[in-house]
Amino acid sequence: MSEASAEDDGETPPSAIAQENCGGELLPTKSIRHIMKRSLGAEHDALTREAIEAVQRCTSETVSMIVSEARLRATRQCHTTLGYADIMGVLRDLRFGCVVSCRCVLMRRRADFPTSA
């Protein structure tokens, strides 16, 4: 069902629901599509709009939640600027330990192999 026909039926289109849940802030569809295609590989070259919107909603809500929690953490620690430690601490608190571990490995690799400017 297209967005226009959903509005005609009195239903709220999925993209409007996603924007309400994320405070109107959604990650760009083009970026989501690019990430999905890169992750899926060449055998899945077609993606439905609904699939992209579902991932868009999930990622936008997750990012919003992480930033909100990091802001609360920073406020409790009496600083106004969100830092790397705030985000990693929230990810650990929310049991995204595998993300934190992978991120730490990547940061160490970058420190070991600095890029030439």
Image (cartoon, rainbow, N blue to C red):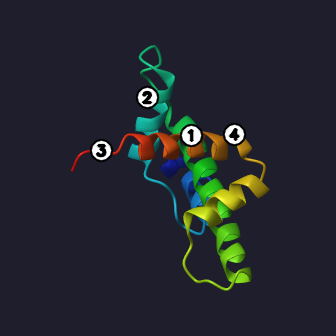
**Which residue bears the numbered disc 1?**
105
The residue identified by callout 3 is 115
Q: How packed is label 4: few (under 14 Cα within 10 Å), some, or many (20 or more)? A: few
Eyeballing the image, is 107 above or below 79? above
The amino acid on which the numbered mark 1 sits, given as a three-letter code, is Val
Per the image, label 4 sits on a secondary structure element best described as: helix
Q: CA distance from mark 1 to mark 2?
A: 22 Å
Nearer mark to the viewer, of 4 and 1: 1
Q: Are marks 3 and 4 in contact (CB under 8 Å)?
A: no
Which of disc 3 and disc 2 is earlier in sequence? 2
- Which numbered disc, 1 or 2, marks the residue closer to the eye? 1
Tag shown at residue 96: none
Other-residue count near label 1 (Cα within 10 Å), few / some / many at <14 / 14–19 / ≥20? few
Q: Earlier in the sequence, mark 3 or mark 1?
A: 1
Q: Which residue is mark 2?
A: 38
SS at badge 2: helix
Q: Which mark is residue 98?
A: 4
Closer to the chain start, of discs 1 and 2, is 2
Instruction: Give the distance between the C-alpha atoms of the residues marked 4 and 1, in whole angstroms.
Output: 11 Å
Work out which residue is located at the far top of the displayed protein and give it: 43
Residue 52 in view in this figure = yes
Name the one closer to the observer, 117 or 71. 117
Binning the other alpha carbons within 10 Å of mark 3 as few (below 14), some (14 to 19) or many (20 upward) gives few
Is residue 12 in view from this perspective? no
Say which quadrant the N terminus sits in: top right
User: What is the spatial separation of the Cα atoms under label 2 and label 4, in whole angstroms?
Assistant: 21 Å
Q: Position of residue 17 (x, y in %)?
A: 63, 58
- The amino acid sitting under disc 3 is Thr
Q: Residue furthest bottom?
A: 78
